Amino acid sequence: MKIHIGIADDHQLFLKSLSLLIGGFEGFQIVAEAMNGKEMLDKLQLLPTPPDMLLLDVNMPVMDGAKTTEAVLKLYPGVKVIALSMKDNDATIVEMLKAGCCAYLLKDIHPTELEKALREIYSTGTYYNDAANVNYRRLLLQSEQKQTLTEREHEFLTLACSDLTYKAIAAKMNVTERTVDGYREILFNKLNVQSRTGMVLEALRRQLVSL
């Protein structure tokens, strides 16, 4: 029985080359090709059965890799989705993993390694020895920790969302201004912002505080 594969990538030359490569692996068959996520979803609806695995480019027009992953898994939860990218930065990896990808492969992966990865993903649903050499659990844990605020950080954030100056906040929290500066830097990092205004807006967006 053939292992059915779908591939979505907005670079046509790469898409065709990858299709030819994987189609040449023993036991594999390409059943769907698309230039973006929406096109892939449309093509999946025309298939008698969904593919076993789907390789998705992270950066695509119309519908990117993360949104496509979420949409595919909502409709076809049994499909194993694999992220393809030129980049191996932590933020992109975490975004794709949270969307539901079971593996993250770099586009410069060696063909032999790619075949090994696809067979392992088909058999086990995971592949942790990919070319990106990523510790997935560490990245996800770090991402979750970034979302969690300590009691004092939350207190600082709540006060920072008022009209109090940082000096007044330090007095109210009974700490030094340097300590408040530390809380500010921690919150800027956790909320991925660069200003007090940005911090307030992001805190409201995430419903960490209410005004």
Image (cartoon, rainbow, N blue to C red):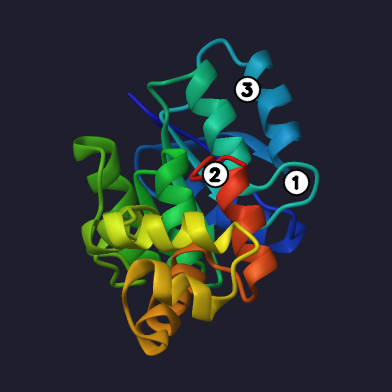
- At x 48%, y 52%, the residue is 95
What separation in Å lies between label 2 and label 3 (alpha carbons)?
34 Å
Q: Nearer the viewer, residue 141 or 153?
A: 153
- At x 75%, y 33%, the residue is 39
Q: Nearer the viewer, mark 1 or mark 2?
A: 2
Image marks 1 and 3: residues in contact by CB distance under 8 Å: no
Residue 123 in the image: state x and y as whole percent: 21, 37
Residue 89 appears anywhere in the view: no
**Residue labelled with disc 3:** 44
Determine whether, in the image, residue 97 is placed left or right of residue 5. Answer: left
Name the N-terminal-most of marks 1 and 2: 1
- At x 51%, y 68%, the residue is 107
Residue 32, image quadrant: top right
Badge 1 element: loop
**Residue labelled with disc 2:** 206
Image marks 1 and 2: residues in contact by CB distance under 8 Å: no
